[in-house]
Image (spheres, rainbow, N blue to C red):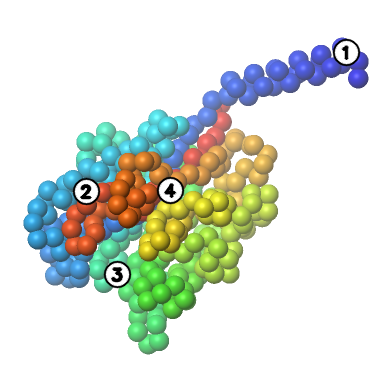
Amino acid sequence: MSTKIMLFVLLLTNIYAARSQDKKYAIRTIAFYNLENLFDTINDPTINDEASPMMELKYNRSAVYWDKIEKLASTIAQIGLEKSKTSPAIIGVAEVENRSVLEDLVKSKHLLKNNYGIIHYDSPDKRGIDVALLYQKKYFNPVFHEVFNPNIYRGNRKVFTRDQLLVSGYLDDEFIHLIVNHWPSRSGGEAKSRPLREKAAYQNVKIIKKIREKDADAKIILMGDFNDDPINASFKKVLKPKRKKKNVGKNDLYNPYENMYRKGFNTLAYRDNLNLFDMLLISAGLVDGGEKDFSSYKMFQAKIFNKRFLSDSKGKYKGYPFRSFSNGGYTGGYSDHYPVYIYLIREEL
């Protein structure tokens, strides 16, 4: 290659790089956070809220409640702030007792200015814990929402577990669907409870099928505390998400958290086991496919919000998520789970 040609190619490369650097992007944070028993201090006779750590406290319930509200709100306000310059546009939450606690949360001084809307349904869970969706009204306009219960049975006995919340609406001017999950726990052991989560996963499959019957190219985000790791059967045999973006086909899901799990990252710890139960999965329409085409919203990064203040700094649980409740008392912590989030970005014209 002649010197003139080499110089010309170099010039074109530099022009392209300069133009790429000049591009501006809209950045929206989509998050999920298990709020660890966010219960109020009032006994509800219709549910077994007496079993919640909040109701088991003998003293200072009100002070504990408001301290927890402030800590959770402060945490949410920081998720994605580094790049999007604001708290999440949308955040799914789990382990909340009712709408009232969510109203207290979004009215906190840390979140009030961002004008969050709330979508919440009371679920049939015996303890009364629910999932919900919070959204900044200036970024997201919900037009439809519905709950689905997995209708899980153990023998002839119904398992009263959390609903799965579907919310559809416009992120700016792009139509997306979000499914918020909190699958059955591992109570009784992972193997014994495994079929319950597989059935919960199958309910997600049915919801996705219902969405795609009306919109074959739907942009879908699954989020939640799945009580399973990315390598468990509920994912590998039922949802079947892809681990690598290049392998994602039109009707596939992509799980960016599987590689994190395999590298040793976690969102919770229990009895010296590290797990990554909290995830966001996306459909093909939100995957850039390696083409770096951000003309519409695509996922840019997936992350775990595991800042140092969210981890226990001492004792036998040092390095674990700094939970709120332990041994019947309040620890002053945040949650026994780390939040997770993704950045969606698109080029601004």
Q: CA distance from mark 2 to mark 3?
A: 26 Å
Q: Residue at left 84%, top 17%? A: 6
Taking the view exactly as shown, the residue that stands out farthest to the top is 4
Under circle 1, the secondary element is helix
Q: Residue type at mark 4: give it.
A: Val
Q: Residue type at mark 1: give it.
A: Thr
Q: Is residue 266 left or right of residue 118?
A: right
Residue placed under numbered mark 1 in the picture: 3
Between circles 2 and 4, the one closer to the viewer is 2
From this view, report whether residue 225 is shown above or below residue 136: below
The answer to whether the residue labelled 2 contacts the one labelled 3, judged by CB atoms less than 8 Å apart, is no
Under circle 2, the secondary element is loop
Q: CA distance from mark 2 to mark 1?
A: 67 Å
Residue placed under numbered mark 4 in the picture: 340
Question: Mark on residue 332?
Answer: 2
The answer to whether the residue labelled 1 contacts the one labelled 3, judged by CB atoms less than 8 Å apart, is no
Disc with the residue nearer the chain's start (2 vs 3): 3
Taking the view exactly as shown, the residue that stands out farthest to the left is 59
Quadrant of the rendering where the C terminus is positioned: top right
Under circle 3, the secondary element is loop
x and y percentages locating residue 258 in the rendered image: 55, 55
Q: Residue at left 22%, top 62%? A: 327
Please identify the quarter of the rendering in which residue 150 is found: bottom left
x and y percentages locating residue 262 in the rendered image: 56, 55
